[in-house]
């Protein structure tokens, strides 16, 4: 053993973040794999995951999942509706809890048996994960395989809005025969001439413009009317307005010297062939012109459903989806409200709720389009309201609601959509013309209110009006992201550990096999599960749910499932994972002078009655055979002060070691003896639970005259 | 209560840690301090509903008045039998009750954030002196004094449908109802009646020309 007087001890090496750079400070690791930072400042091995749907009594999972495309959790109505949605295979499912262990998922969208029938494929080509967005009344679900979006409130699911307009209604009014008095045939509901064409108990007709200088000269002026119809669905969304009906024409008509007021020549008309709407339609909104020849306007106005409930109070003119005719005796003076001029809802890929509206983007026909909904009607989009943020029409690849507005991304640019100064419209501000986003589901808020996402060159952060590249230190690994599969990246922010986690497909992988983890301390990595979609529950639990593959320790097979990350349960154990902490090359700045590495002191917190493996590499060579390795002495417990263990400890005992206390930290000394090296790297690896605090190393420098040389 | 998955599944060889044990318990205990929901019970967990509060889902309130009006297959009903309610001739909405105002068709309840199903069933009988042509009578349900428009019998559109404004039938039974969400607090649900005007706005002698409400029942189901 060397003389302790010529040794010196390094500063504490407190590894909490990693870097892919060759030259890093001693406190920066080259790899921290499958660890989380604890609230007490240590690094703890990742636990779990636990299956959301537990195995049954026979040890089998009750659900056979397909390809995972999306997962989402939200609550509605103040938490009364708790919704976990999963897009797996050709169906979208709603989690029903454990009340029926054999059928924990209810089919809401699929080819058969769902609330909405959509024949979805199961493509494995790169695509965005299924998008979800919560609105005050329900959730918008956007499958990516060229399917229409679905709106779901926990009980009712419908395709979002309408993609077609109703057919035009047909108008029936008075007709005029040649050589006969005007308006005497057809649907001539008035009170003129012989008897009543309206029953005496009914009032006068109300349509038509009457000139009434004196009663003797009172006459109906030539006029005309047209109508159109809109469907309205269960969620209040409106279809496009139909084409206008045929024109109902009133010819000029004298009242005559009957002594009756001019009102008697006004008419009622009838609108027929008002088509019922598709499933989900609960009413039809009938709109009509005022007398187009006398009112001075050709616009359509909503015809109120009745007069008893207020002219504008009812949700639709026809509050049903059955009737096809509408006797119209609503005068021009009662129609004041114009209908919403809605467009057919396109097939789109992205949506986000911001500024009181649902913004949809990247439609089948226009990848660069951005369209706002009408406030409160999240499936109704006004015609001619579309925006093209990128002047060149670049595909929109991300939307994110953030402080002050909506972040809009293309692959190569970033915009902020804000309310205009007068608050009536919107304006687009270009935040960066060179930085964009490639994966819409990689966007997530960080705990400081900033936003992080995956761009072409790595991870970016937007905060305080500035976009910064966040991942330069790990560019070595970021460059391994499969660019073809980058669009399927998924991310979420874990409020518990304050980590941003983004799963990506690395190298030639077709699935997301690697997780970049960012926290205040820097970057770490996870490899424990292959997660295709991820979300955090929007309730107090803040569970991170991942849809993907985990290896089952019981069978050794990878199983598809929905996983609660960082949680453990008794009836499922995932296959052991490699927990790895690897220092950088220590220390490049002093590498021109060789030194010997004598002893490594590892600071752990007791975590398992087992040991880890320590490996030491030297001089930039990290081969399959380390210079030093030891898998027996790196104990994960203090041998001279062992704790109480599960299955051994006695309940309610204050005598050591049975007293239940917090786990203690301790030092573990390992004599590694690496002689005369330029640089060295220490790697700690285990499949057991481990909690790492830090390390120090005893080095023995080789001073000049002791044989050190620069090779 | 949401589904809770404790953080740690302890195994042999792991050191005891009171913080981890407490963390596991706390997640469950904190949830139970809230409320249990359907997610928390297995199918058929309750073998008998005797263990479930009868009013946990629905609460039924009712008030009714029975009238012996003497009508049968051969006999017209008696005019103004005991406890019948004479609708006012002043054309304004009044709460249906006994003549002296007691025993009104009115229920005051305290609810949570609930949906109320209000149902009012009753019999109508007019009394006319001679050849007087009575206008119709109409009825509605009110919540906190506000009439629920869709419960009104008739079109309410006097100018366009004079007879359709109300009903003038004799010996007739009706039921009106509505389902309406209410905010937490105290709510008063009542059944009201009003005699409408005729075409000429004539006055009618309330001692000889009037409508009466005979048997009647107001039922409220609070759906929690």
Image: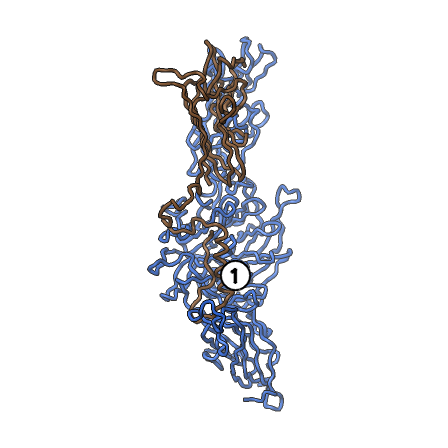
Chain colours: A blue, B brown
Please say if A289 is above or below A109: above
- Using the rendered image of the protein, determine whether residue A673 is visible from the camera's viewpoint: yes
Number of disc labels: 1
| Residue to which mark 1 is pinned | A501
How dense is the environment of label 1, judged by Cα within 10 Å: few (below 14), some, or many (20 and up)?
many
Q: Where does residue A302 sit, x and y in percent of width and height?
A: 53, 30
**Is A567 in front, or is A237?**
A567
Query: A58 and A423: which one is in front?
Result: A58
| A193 to A53, vertically: above or below | above
- Residue A250 seen in the figure: no
Image quarter of the N terminus of chain A: bottom right
Front residue of A420/B146: it is: B146
Identity of the residue drawn at 47% across and 24% down = B153
Chain containing the residue with disc 1: A
Give coordinates of residue A452: x percent, y percent. Answer: 57, 58
Q: Position of residue A688 (x, y in %)?
A: 45, 71
Corner quadrant of residue A357: top right
Q: Residue at the location (63% across, 57% down)? A: A466
Q: Residue at x 63, y 41 (%)?
A: A424
Q: Residue A159: x percent and y percent?
A: 45, 43
The quadrant of the rendering that contains the C terminus of chain A is bottom right
Instruction: Check the image and name the residue furthest to the left.
Output: A58
Tell me the element at label 1: strand
């Amino acid at each position: 053993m060397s003389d302790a007087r010529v040794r010196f001890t390094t500063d504490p090496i407190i590894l909490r973040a990693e870097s892919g750079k060759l030259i890093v400070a001693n406190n920066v690791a080259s790899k921290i794999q499958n660890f989380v930072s604890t609230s007490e400042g240590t690094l703890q091995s990742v636990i779990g995951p636990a299956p959301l749907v537990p195995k049954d009594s026979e040890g089998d999972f009750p659900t056979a999942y397909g390809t995972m495309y999306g997962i989402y959790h939200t609550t509605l109505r103040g938490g009364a509706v708790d919704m976990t949605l999963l897009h797996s295979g050709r169906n979208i499912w709603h989690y029903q809890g454990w009340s029926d262990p054999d059928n924990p998922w209810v089919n809401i969208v699929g080819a058969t048996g769902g609330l909405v029938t959509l024949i979805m494929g199961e493509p494995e080509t790169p695509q965005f994960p299924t998008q979800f967005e919560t609105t005050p009344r329900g959730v918008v679900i956007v499958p990516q395989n060229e399917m229409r979006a679905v709106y779901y409130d926990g009980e009712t699911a419908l395709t979002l809005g309408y993609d077609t307009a109703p057919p035009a209604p047909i108008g029936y009014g008075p007709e005029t025969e040649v050589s006969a008095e005007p308006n005497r045939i057809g649907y001539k509901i008035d009170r003129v001439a012989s008897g009543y064409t309206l029953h005496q108990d009914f009032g006068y007709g109300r349509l038509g413009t009457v000139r009434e200088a004196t009663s003797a000269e009172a006459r109906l002026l030539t006029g005309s009317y047209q109508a159109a119809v809109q469907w309205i669905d269960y969620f209040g969304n409106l279809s496009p307005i139909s084409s206008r009906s045929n024109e109902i024409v009133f010819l000029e008509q004298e009242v005559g010297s009957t002594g009756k007021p001019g009102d008697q020549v006004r008419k009622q008309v009838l609108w027929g062939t008002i088509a019922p709407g598709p499933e989900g339609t609960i009413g039809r909104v009938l709109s009509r012109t005022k007398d187009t020849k006398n009112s001075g306007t050709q616009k359509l106005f909503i015809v109120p459903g009745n007069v008893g409930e207020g002219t504008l109070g009812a949700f639709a003119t026809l509050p049903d989806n059955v009737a096809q005719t509408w006797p119209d005796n609503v005068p021009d003076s009662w129609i004041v409200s114009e209908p919403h001029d809605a467009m057919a809802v396109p097939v789109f890929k992205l949506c986000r709720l911001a500024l009181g509206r649902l913004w949809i983007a990247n439609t089948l026909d226009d990848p660069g389009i951005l369209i706002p909904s009408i406030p409160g009607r999240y499936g109704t989009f006004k015609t001619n309201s579309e925006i093209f943020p990128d002047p060149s029409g670049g595909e929109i690849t991300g939307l994110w609601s953030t402080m002050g507005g909506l972040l809009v991304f293309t692959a190569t640019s970033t915009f902020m959509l804000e309310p205009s100064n007068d608050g009536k419209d919107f304006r687009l501000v270009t935040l960066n013309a060179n930085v964009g986003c490639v994966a819409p589901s990689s966007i997530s808020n960080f705990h400081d209110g900033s936003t992080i996402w995956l761009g072409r060159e790595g991870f970016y952060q937007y905060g305080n009006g500035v976009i910064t590249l966040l991942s330069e230190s790990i560019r070595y690994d970021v460059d391994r992201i499969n660019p073809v599969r980058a669009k399927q990246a998924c991310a979420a922010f874990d409020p518990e550990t304050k980590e941003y986690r983004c799963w990506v497909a690395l190298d030639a992988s077709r699935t997301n096999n690697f997780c970049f983890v960012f926290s205040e301390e820097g970057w770490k990595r996870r490899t424990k599960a292959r997660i295709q979609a991820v979300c955090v529950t929007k309730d107090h639990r803040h569970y991170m749910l991942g849809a993907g593959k985990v290896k089952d320790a019981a069978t050794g097979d990878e199983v598809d499932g929905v996983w609660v990350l960082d949680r453990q349960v008794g009836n499922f154990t995932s296959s052991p994972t490699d927990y790895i902490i690897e220092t950088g090359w220590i220390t490049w700045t002093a590498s021109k002078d060789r030194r010997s590495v004598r002893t490594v002191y590892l600071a752990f917190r007791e975590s398992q009655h087992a040991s880890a493996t320590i490996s030491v590499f030297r001089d930039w060579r990290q081969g399959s055979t380390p210079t030093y390795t030891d898998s027996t002495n790196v104990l994960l417990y203090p041998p001279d002060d062992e704790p109480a263990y599960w299955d051994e400890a006695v309940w309610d005992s204050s005598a050591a070691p049975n007293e239940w206390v917090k786990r203690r930290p301790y030092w573990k000394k390992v004599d590694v003896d690496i002689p005369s090296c330029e640089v060295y790297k220490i790697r700690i690896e285990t499949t057991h639970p481990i909690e790492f605090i830090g390390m120090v190393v005893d080095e023995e420098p080789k001073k000049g005259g002791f044989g050190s040389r620069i090779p | 209560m949401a589904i809770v998955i404790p953080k740690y599944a302890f195994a042999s060889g792991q050191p005891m840690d009171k913080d981890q044990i407490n963390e596991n318990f706390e997640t469950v205990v904190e949830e139970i301090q809230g409320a249990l929901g359907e997610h928390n019970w297995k199918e058929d967990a309750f073998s008998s509903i005797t263990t479930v509060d009868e009013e946990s889902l629905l609460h039924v309130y009712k008030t009714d008045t029975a009238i012996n009006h003497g009508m049968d297959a051969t006999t017209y009903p008696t005019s103004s039998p005991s406890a019948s309610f004479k609708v006012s001739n002043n054309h304004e909405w009044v709460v249906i009750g006994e003549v002296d105002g007691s025993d009104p068709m009115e229920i005051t309840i305290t609810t949570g954030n609930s949906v109320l199903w209000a149902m009012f069933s009753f019999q109508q009988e007019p009394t006319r002196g001679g050849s007087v042509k009575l206008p119709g009578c109409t009825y509605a349900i009110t919540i906190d004094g506000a009439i629920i428009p869709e419960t009104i019998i008739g079109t309410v559109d006097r100018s366009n449908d004079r007879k359709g404004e109300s009903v003038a039938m004799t010996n007739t039974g009706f039921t009106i109802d509505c389902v309406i969400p209410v905010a937490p607090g105290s709510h008063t649900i009542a059944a009201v009646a009003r005699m409408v005007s005729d075409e000429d706005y004539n006055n009618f002698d309330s001692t000889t020309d009037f409508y009466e409400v005979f048997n009647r029942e107001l039922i409220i189901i609070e759906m929690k």
